[in-house]
Amino acid sequence: MKRILKHIPLIGWFFKKDKPSTKYENRTKEELYNQAKEIGIDGRSTMNKEELVDALKAETNHSKNTEAKDYSSNYESRTKEELYELAKDYDIQGRSTMNKEELIQALRDYRSEEVAEPAPAKSTINYENRTKEELYELAKENEIEGRSTMNKEELIEALRDH
């Protein structure tokens, strides 16, 4: 019976031992990144596959109210360049002149303020300090139509209106 069922689509897949895996380690980096984006894991764009796995596991454990590694505050293991990119994501002012220790402190300060205060309204976000490419990516994430033909000022206006 098992042999016959294997030839029927989906049922054959059910009996196979090599079913698509739900384990993070068996997923592609792109799949992990997309899930991290869905969940809202900070710093995902600078993470390698192993770091994405760790961050997703930590988030899963955290949501189950178990003890988990606080990946987002594990800044010491990151390079200055990675910390700079995170600071850029958070629009932390003065980041270009900060050393690694100052970046770590600024990121921790930002995270503690983020928990204490609600997120700022979209219209108060400082888009002017971002590059056109960064604004385009934000517009893409927000599914703003016509973004490919917009200049920097138009992207800023569209993001504020969104």
Image (tube, rainbow, N blue to C red):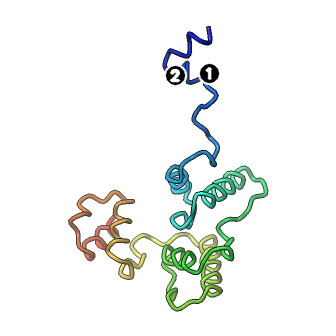
Measured along the vertical axis of the image, is residue 93 above or below residue 32? below
The location of residue 89, given as percent across then percent down, is 49, 73
- Total number of numbered discs in the rendering: 2
Question: Residue 140 or 79: which is nearer the viewer?
Answer: 79
The location of residue 123, given as percent across then percent down, is 39, 73
Measured along the vertical axis of the image, is residue 102 above or below residue 40? below
Residue at label 2?
10
Question: Residue 97 or 1: which is nearer the viewer?
Answer: 1
Q: Residues within 10 Å of mark 2 (few under 14, many from 20)?
A: few
Q: Secondary structure under badge 1?
A: helix
Question: Residue 130 or 79: which is nearer the viewer?
Answer: 79
The location of residue 11, given as percent across then percent down, is 55, 18
Q: Residue at x 69, y 71 (%)?
A: 74
Residue at label 1?
15
Q: Residue at x 64, y 43 (%)?
A: 23
In this view, the residue farthest toward the left is: 149
Q: Which of the two discs, 1 and 2, labels the residue nearer the N terminus?
A: 2
Residue type marked 1: Phe
Measured along the vertical axis of the image, is residue 141 above or below residue 22? below
The location of residue 35, given as percent across then percent down, is 54, 51
Measured along the vertical axis of the image, is residue 60 above or below residue 107? above
Query: In screen coordinates, is 3 left or right of 34?
Result: right
Q: Secondary structure under badge 2?
A: loop
Q: Residues within 10 Å of mark 1 (few under 14, many from 20)?
A: few
* Residue contact between numbered discs 1 and 2, judged by CB atoms under 8 Å: no
In this view, the residue farthest toward the top is: 1
